[in-house]
Image (cartoon, rainbow, N blue to C red):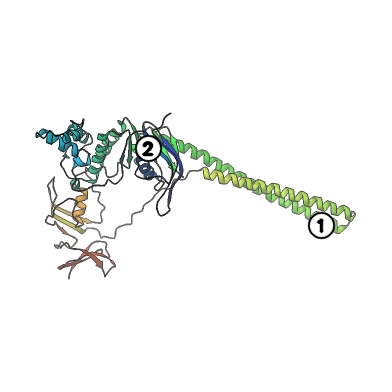
Amino acid sequence: MSFAIVCQDVSFAWPDGTVVLDGLDAAFGAGRTGLIGVNGSGKSTLLRLIAGELRPASGTVSVAGEVGYLPQDLPLGTARTVADLLGIGAARAALHAIERGEATEANFTAVGDDWDVEERARAELDRLGLAGVGLDRTAGTLSGGEVIMVGLAARFLARPDVLLLDEPTNNLDLDARRRLYDAVASWPGVLVVVSHDRELLDRVDEIADLREGGVRSFGGNLTGYEELLAVEREAAERTVRAAQTDLRRQKRELEEAQVKLARRVRYGNKMMESKREPKIIMQERKRQAQVSAGKHRIMHEERLAGARDRLSEAEDAVREDDEIRIELPATEVPAGRTVLTVTGLAAAEPSPATLSELIVRGPERIALVGANGSGKTTFLRALAGRRSRGSTPRPRPRVRPRTGRPMRWARRTPCSAWGRTSWSGRAWRACATCRSGSTSWTTR
């Protein structure tokens, strides 16, 4: 079997000396591979090494063909257009220039064979659920999920031989995830995806588990791999139980042997004291008994040490995956207290809308949901008094915490009363949090 990606004895460490990979051997063939592993195991670093963004300290990384790489955090300029993000800005500008009659050699060179570049870009965006995103729209007006999908569309348009995706479902809503799943399922080339998304990993052809400095490959999806791990874990746990039983038996036999030896010593001493046999015979028997006792003790101690080693090996074979558990503390906000009032909140372009009124009464935990680009992050930034990226200054919404009195937005300063952060201005001063857990506002 030929492999599109081959890593041989690859080692990599950060400038501070932190070792990420040490002598790693891995290979990825045709089809879709899900690269999994615990946080910090080096998955993203390995993708960057394959993409050529990083150089290994030792070893080699070889890739057959052109590589397309979608990182977790896409570097963006807020003034860049969607066409620029798709990598078609120059070809599109040259195409429009030719249509205006500027048939220069430079323009024809820029277009190349991509005379249908706009149509292909538009089709790719539509396929990924970005029908409402124009090619001239600036990156600063896109949501986090839209940025990821535009980046994915750019990689699909480039048609690389090898496509690397690092956590592509981050920031995506349910509809966008489903479109991504379909796009991954239809990818004809080599694809390696790093993800914790179980549904996405159930659509791959192979699982590569990066663990303890090595890569273990499994021909199947995540569900099949977990079933295999469950069988292996059960067998390893049976081995541990058997080793524990053997260890207890060896300890018991050693204790019994020690009791028997002690009895023989007492009997020999008694015979020596009674002087029933010649002294030379008694001393020879004592010597032989001591030699026999030493051999017997060493035999049982070796058996006990062997049992301990087998138990240790069996315990090491049991794979323990740590689970993260988060316990949210109960709120101290009294029931029915109004903690936030919003009136006249206007959305920014390109979808102007106004929230006439929002009243939040505690204690309450609220899930803010919506499609990518619907304004969830912008809404939270507005409540926090922060401008959205790429936005122009707009009149502040009337956001009134608890007392229902109007507030003035100003800079953050330390709160001397509680040692936390507060918003303060010329007319109003605010403690970040009062003892009840809601925002407290007082006049200066």
Instruction: Classify mark 1: residues with Cα within 10 Å, few (<14), some (14-19) or many (20+).
Output: few
Residue 28 position, x and y percent, is: 40, 35
Q: What residue is rendered at 38% in x and 39% in y?
A: 35
Q: Which residue is mark 1?
A: 269
Residue 34, numbered label: 2
Q: Quadrant of residue 98?
A: top left
Residue 80 position, x and y percent, is: 19, 45
Q: Quadrant of residue 168?
A: top left
Question: Can residue 122 be seen at all in this image of the molecule?
Answer: no
Give the residue type that dot 1 points to.
Asn
Residue at far right of view? 278
Instruction: Classify mark 2: residues with Cα within 10 Å, few (<14), some (14-19) or many (20+).
Output: many
Could you give the CA–CA distance between mark 2 and mark 1, rounded to whole angstroms?
A: 73 Å
The quarter of the image holding the C terminus is bottom left
Relative to 73, residue 122 above or below? above
Q: Mark 2: which secondary structure?
A: strand
